[in-house]
Amino acid sequence: MTDLLTISGLTRGFYGVSVLNGVDIAIPEGSFTGLIGPNGAGKSTLFNVVSGLYRPDGGAVTFAGEDVTALPPEALVRRRLVRTFQLARGFPKLSVFQHLMLYGREQAGESLVSALIGSHKARLREEALAEQAWAVIRRLKLDGVVDNPVVALSGGQKKLVEIGRALMAEPRLILLDEPMAGVNPSLTEEIAGHLVALNREGVTICLIEHDMGLIRRLCDPVIVMAEGRTLTRGSFDEVASDERVLEAYLGRRH
């Protein structure tokens, strides 16, 4: 497989404390990669740096052959590198439909002139985005809450909206930060099914998840981080039997 995302020597610290200590990771195109590690390993910080929320102190990020180090989030989304958050973000009082429409690509009506007087091109694009949003809503089975404000949704429904937001950007790669955390078992299985289907359709996925059963079932390869570094990678069984991984999770006296 060709690597879609390559992270080389990435570093980041906060107030003199180093969080990422030279991370090296490659995500193959078309893969369903799992990213695991104990709390404090730097996984979410890595996603924040790669997705443009934080600037790295050093190192490089390459996406689809292009150096995208330190590009802002909107520039990365235009390149179809998208991430989700542990806690759903956005505009809580917007409806599910409005929320998805907001994240559609190539918003033709964003200029002041188009907003004031409208244009044929803008109307056509808005209609296309509405059709896309409805397709995402049906796919994720959000029909019953389509007009509800996001703030009124259950935790699991908010997770689905977060995935829907990513889909509106027509991603090549989605970085998913614990999309099943705090979700009941039946909805966990539903979300897992959506992710597997997306991956089979060609979307590359990198998933942070603490449920090792899900990682084992969904992900190959699996990358392990510890203390802000890449510890190892391989199949789930390979990394689960690695003494360094056991030490990172359980300590030296495991």
Image (cartoon, rainbow, N blue to C red):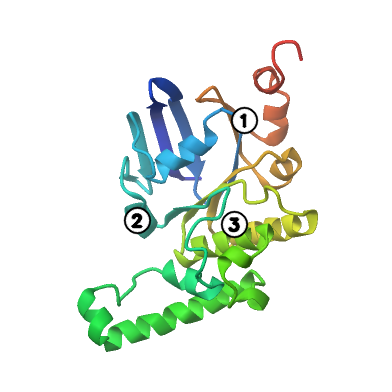
User: Residue drawn at (50%, 70%), measured in percent from left and top?
Assistant: 94
Q: Amino acid at mark 3?
A: Asn
Q: Residues within 10 Å of mark 3 (few under 14, many from 20)?
A: some
Task: Indicate the amino acid at tag 1.
Answer: Gly
Res 200 seen here? no
Question: Crowdedness of circle 1 by 10 Å Cα count: few (<14), some, many (20+)?
Answer: many
Residue shown at 62%/46% (left/top)? 178
Residue 34 falls in which quadrant of the image? top right
Q: For the view shown, which residue lies furthest in the right direction?
A: 186
Residue at the spot 42% in from the left edge and 35% down from the top edge = 7
Q: Earlier in the sequence, mark 1 or mark 3?
A: 1
In the image, residue 251 above or below residue 42: above
Find disc 1 in the rendering and name its residue: 37
Per the model, the C-alpha gap separating discs 3 and 2 is 23 Å
Residue receiving disc 2: 74
Circle 2: is it few (<14), some (14-19), or many (20+) Cα within 10 Å? some
Q: Nearer the viewer, mark 1 or mark 3?
A: 1
Query: Which of the marked residues, 2 or 1, is nearer the chain's N terminus?
Result: 1
Q: Give the mark nearest the N terminus, 3 or 2.
A: 2
Q: Nearer the viewer, residue 161 or 249?
A: 161
Q: Is 53 displayed left or right of 252 in the figure?
A: left
Q: In the rendered view, does 85 fall on the left or right side of 220?
A: left
Q: Residue furthest bottom?
A: 120
Q: What is the quadrant of residue 248 in the picture?
A: top right
Tell me where residue 84 appears, x and y as whole percent. 52, 52
160 vs 57, left or right, is right
Which percent across, then down, holds residue 65?
Answer: 34, 46
* Number of the label disc, if any, that sits on residue 97: none
Helix, strand or loop at disc 3?
Answer: helix
Q: Quadrant of the C terminus?
A: top right
Instruction: In the rendered view, tell whether residue 41 sits above or below residue 170.
Output: above
Badge 3 is on which residue? 199
